[in-house]
Image (cartoon, rainbow, N blue to C red):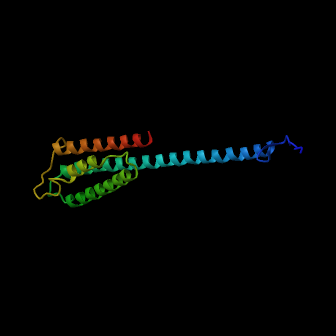
Amino acid sequence: MSSTFNADVLFLGLTAKDLLIAGGWFFTIIGWLVSNAQANSRERRKEVRAEIDACIKIQADLVLKSRTYFGSPKSDQLSKSRAAEIRFELQRLITRVERLEKKYPQFDVTGACGELMDAISGDPFESADREALPADSDLLIKIEADTHVLIDQLEDGFVNAFG
C-alpha cells in the first residue's frame, strides 16, 4: 500500500493558510480580553479613588462643622441644626467607609473611623452643659488628628489594593 502525503496539510488537516487565519483570530481575541481586563481594572481603580476623595471631603466638612459647633455655646440658635448636620455627615462617612472595607479587605479603617466618630459625637456633643471651646482645645485637636489618621489609612488602603 502506498500512502500519499500532502505537503500542504500541516496540523489536523489544516493548511498553513488556515492556521494563519485561525492564529490571527486567536491573537485578536486574546488582545481584546487583555485590553478589556486592563480597562476594567483601571475603571475600578478610578471609582475607588473617587470614593476615597469623597470620604476625604466629608471628613474636611466634618472638621469645619465640628469647629463651628464646638466653638459656639450651647445657647446658640443654630446648635441643634449644626448637630444634626454633623450626625448626618458622620453617618454618610461611616457608610462609605464600611462599603469600601467590605469590597476591598485592604482597607482596614474601622478603628480609625470609630475613633473619629467617638471624638466628634462623644462627650460633650449635644450635652446640656456644653460650653464654647477655643480653637486649640484638646477635643478639636483630637478631631483633627483622628481625621488625619483616617485619611492616611484610606490612602494606605488604596495603595495596598491598587499599588
Q: Is residue 8 visible?
A: yes
The quadrant where residue 136 appears:
top left
Q: Is residue 21 left or right of residue 59?
A: right
Residue, x 12% and y 54% (percent of image)? Answer: 130
How many numbered markers are drawn? Answer: 0
Judging depth in this view, the residue of 80 and 54 nearest the camera is 54
Relative placement, left or right, of 40 versus 62 is: right
Residue farthest to the left, as pictured: 129
Percent coordinates x, y for residue 40 in the rendering = 53, 49
Image location (x, y in percent) of residue 97? 34, 52
Q: Quadrant of the N terminus?
A: top right
Left or right, 132 with reference to 16: left
Residue at (36, 40) in percent of width and height: 156
Q: Is residue 63 visible?
A: no
Q: Position of residue 141 (x, y in %)?
A: 20, 42
Image quadrant containing the C terminus: top left
> How far from the left and from the top, in percent, is residue 71?
18, 49
Residue at screen point 37% across, 45% down: 106
- Residue at image position (24%, 48%) is 116
Considering every residue shown, the one lying at the far right of the view is 2
Q: Nearer the viewer, residue 1 or 31?
A: 1
Instruction: Work out whether residue 82 or residue 101 is closer to the camera in this orientation and state it.
Output: 101
